[in-house]
Amino acid sequence: MSLTTQIRDQFTLFLSSDDVESICQAFQNIKKLIPQLSSTTSFYPTIRDAISPTVTFTTRRLFQTLDERWNFYTADRQKVLASPRKHVLVSGGGPCGLRSAVEFAMLGFNISLVEKRTIFSRHNILKTWTPTVEDLMALGFKSYFPNFQIHGIHAIGTRELQICLLRTALLLGVNFIYGEATAGIIEPGITIPGDSTDPTQWRIITNTAGLVVTNTAVNSTTDSNQESAPGSPRKNVPAELAFTAGEQNFERLEKHSKVDYFEKATSLDGAVLRDEASLPSEIKHIIPIDSLVIAEGESSKLIRHLGFDRFVTRFAPAIGIIVNCTFNRANAIEKKLKEFVVYRAQADWRETCLGKLYENGVEVENMEYMRFSTHFIVVTAKKDSLVKFGVLKENRLNIQDALEQENIDFDRLRDFARHLATAAGVPETAPLASNHGVNIFDFSCKGTLTKPFTTLVPSKPSENAHHPLVLPIGDSLVNPFWPQGLGVNRGFHSSIDAVWTVFQDTVVSRDIALNERDISHRMMMWFPLMPVLVNSGVQWKADPLTRYASQIPQTMHMNDVQKRATVTCLNQRILNALKLKLPTAI
Ligand SMILES: Cc1cc2nc3c(=O)[nH]c(=O)nc-3n(C[C@H](O)[C@H](O)[C@H](O)COP(=O)(O)OP(=O)(O)OC[C@H]3O[C@@H](n4cnc5c(N)ncnc54)[C@H](O)[C@@H]3O)c2cc1C
């Protein structure tokens, strides 16, 4: 078989596979067929030029799409390539980690992404905003999923979104490590037997067990540092159920008001390994870093052990239940089902499926049905109704206690889910999906870190010592009340903002980088991020001013004192872009 045919066949496999392992395997095979990749610093152009002549005109469009953003960054990439500090590690391959990895790679960073799972199993359908979808299109989504409709409500499966970004990340040269978790940060000066990485650098280690913690100095409350093995369901939970009840450590929440809480970090420095004795026995990879991006989602242990405190707001108690049933495209009934959303607040709710459910003893506040790769149903349920149905064994006072694993009757939960599916019109022949068949979780809080960055400090400070930036993004930074659509839509911005920070830190200065990171984070918190305030995704670049800043002044409803406080923290570049002037003294 000719080389051309082999490359084409492997690339076809790369595009048609829909699980992480097959995509990565096909990609490895392509790399082996293009030996010049191992010695080049321009990974993407080399792989594009090798694949393009072997594929059809339609497939080639993917490269034309990616070229647009790639070419935009030519000058900035040269600056990054000339820098000695361009190793970035992103911990977590959810939508936000992948999105930031893609932007880092475009800018020429040497980027590794560590994801503890081996499969992208989440069927959750995300409602995305037009600018977010445009951004995804510019990163190849339409080439990977040609049937996707760009118009109308943009509902994208989390899995599909991850697959799109993974494929693009690989083409851009991202070193994707999966099935391993980020286990700790090693400070310079520690030698690891048999390791060839530079011991004068900061490094990350990975393993299959999760974070190794060296100290828990901030608070001595017990830390549940035991994670289930990657990809495996939690103990005692049937395979098709995914139990994701309350992700916060409620023992750490300090109450400030009826709704506001403060969650203190578990330790300031616990994730940093500062002597040989703290190294774990199992180390899979050792990766040098100049900057670290944490995209591990809301329950990130790294965040909690690197001194990040959080504000937590708790709303009215509510429990979310998500049901995924397999979708058989060949089944006419399943294909005909129409997407809908109904609320108990509607005057005619008794005539809707909510009314029928009520007659069967299943009480939910609202219900939304969508279809992508699965039949996807999301409802909000009151605790009392779940107790009445027998899903919750005891009616415990607060939701976290009520959702303790041993308080859930998983058979009744499955029955509850089936009732929901039937009410949505999903036939009995469509079983609960084997992954995330039913999810039950606390749906009533959101949290925000008190700061969007920190730096790693070596134990023996020296003038030339490097202090890597640590930047949390996505749900790790601000975990959303996602029915407001703020999950990936806002998460993408914090992801790309972090890329801008690392870029400025690398080629401009740390002070400016951190000043702008502070500003972009404040802006995100200040103004109600809505699709209309975000520029078209076609023009998104790492610089936040290309994405969402231009209309911020109009959205600020502040008095003069607040305005002054706000404006005086903006640097000149941003003041100019926003056409703002420093106010005179008051
Ligand atoms: C049911 C449901 C519906 C939603 N609907 C919407 C919606 O309509 N619109 C919207 O915008 N948002 C929605 N969201 C929210 C959205 O899914 C999240 O905001 C988004 O997934 C956040 O992405 P992330 O990458 O920050 O974190 P996550 O998606 O949580 O990804 C974190 C990743 O990090 C990995 N990880 C964790 N620890 C480690 C470690 N130590 N080492 C390596 N890897 C690690 C995890 O395996 C995971 O893959 C919804 C969420 C749910 C649950």
Image: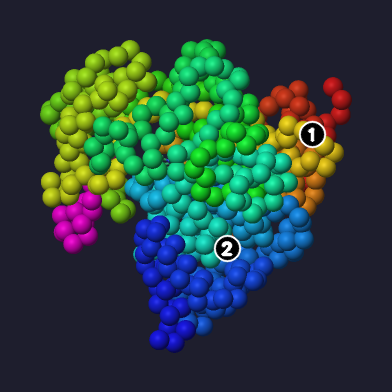
Q: Nearer the viewer, mark 1 or mark 2?
A: 1
Q: Of residues 273 and 121, which is closer to you in this image?
A: 273
Q: Is mark 2 within 8 Å of ligand 1?
A: no
Does residue 49 appear left or right of residue 235 in this picture? Answer: right
Percent x, y for residue 109? 66, 57
Does residue 162 appear left or right of residue 583 in this picture? Answer: left
Residue drawn at (38%, 36%) of the image: 228
Q: Is residue 259 above or below residue 89?
A: above
Q: How many labels were placed on the picture?
A: 2
Spatial CA distance of label 1 from label 2 is 34 Å
Three-letter amino acid code at disc 2? Gly
Check the image and tell me how it is coloured. Answer: rainbow
> What kind of element bears circle 1?
loop
Mark 1 lies on residue: 461
Does residue 207 appear left or right of residue 326 in this picture? Answer: right
Residue drawn at (56%, 73%) of the image: 47
**Disc 1 packing (10 Å; few <14; some 14–19; many ≥20):** few
Q: Which mark is residue 173?
A: 2
